[in-house]
Amino acid sequence: MTEIIKERASPVKLPGRAVKTAVRDHWPVVLEYADEGAGPWLVDMSHCRRWDIQGEQLNQAVRGGLALPASPGEVMVREGALTGRTGARQVLLWRLDGDAAGPEGRQFTEITEGTLCLALIGKEIFRITEKLGDLDLADPGRTAPFLLLGPFAHVTSQIIVLGRDPRSTVVLIACSRAFGRDMVQAVLGAGEEFGLRAAGEDRFRAALRAIGA
């Protein structure tokens, strides 16, 4: 019997005309939009695979011997895999490189299709995010990358600051896919005065290279 695999769909639709696309693990992915401008940019990264991992032997649940952060709020990025400590017995694992390899064992839950993931990239990002919540993503007391949990645009979110250089800031925001439309509208509204535009995954890849992630 032939298995029928349904095409996956992002919970959000960004404004703009896609000029370069791809299909990855049955996800349609926009690689580039027309007229992306000079930044800042909003990128839909909902197709990158994401898992929550819970338990006592967390290191045994991650392939390839990826090191896990020791303390809540700490983040590590290595070989396209992002791990973040959300609690004493809980971490998240996101694949930023398009690789489908995930955790092992029974301690994990894949949350990719139940959540959305957006990337904010470039200049003025912290001026945009400060309009959408009280969390201080530009806190000088924190060293990027780091993770914050809390409300963003009034939605409970996981927020990861990957880079804080004013010219190449990279922030990832994940929350329930049910809030996808409202989240995008809130972010675009907050970023309108700064010229925030939709961009494709290629822009995100370039930003990761710029910060050495």
Image: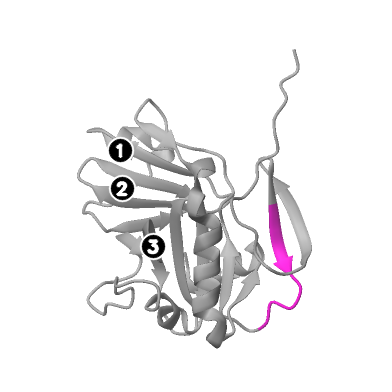
Q: Which residue is mark 3?
A: 160
The circle on residue 182 is: none
- State the image coordinates of residue 109 (x, y, percent, origin top left): 41, 34
Cα distance between the residues tagged 3 and 2: 15 Å
Nearer the observer, 87 or 208? 87
Q: Secondary structure at mark 1?
A: helix
Q: Earlier in the sequence, mark 1 or mark 3?
A: 1
Identify the residue at horizontal 49%, vertical 78% (top origin). Answer: 190
Let me know if residue 77 is in the magenta part: no
Q: Which residue is mark 2?
A: 68
The disc labelled 2 sits on which kind of residue?
A: Leu
Regarding residue 147, the answer to whether it shows in the image is: no
Question: Label 1 vs label 2: CA separation?
Answer: 7 Å
Residue occupying the point 70% across, 33% down: 6
The boundaries of the magenta stretch are 29-37
Give the residue type that dot 3 points to: Ile
Q: Is residue 161 above or below residue 158?
A: below
Q: Residue at x 38, y 26 (%)?
A: 105
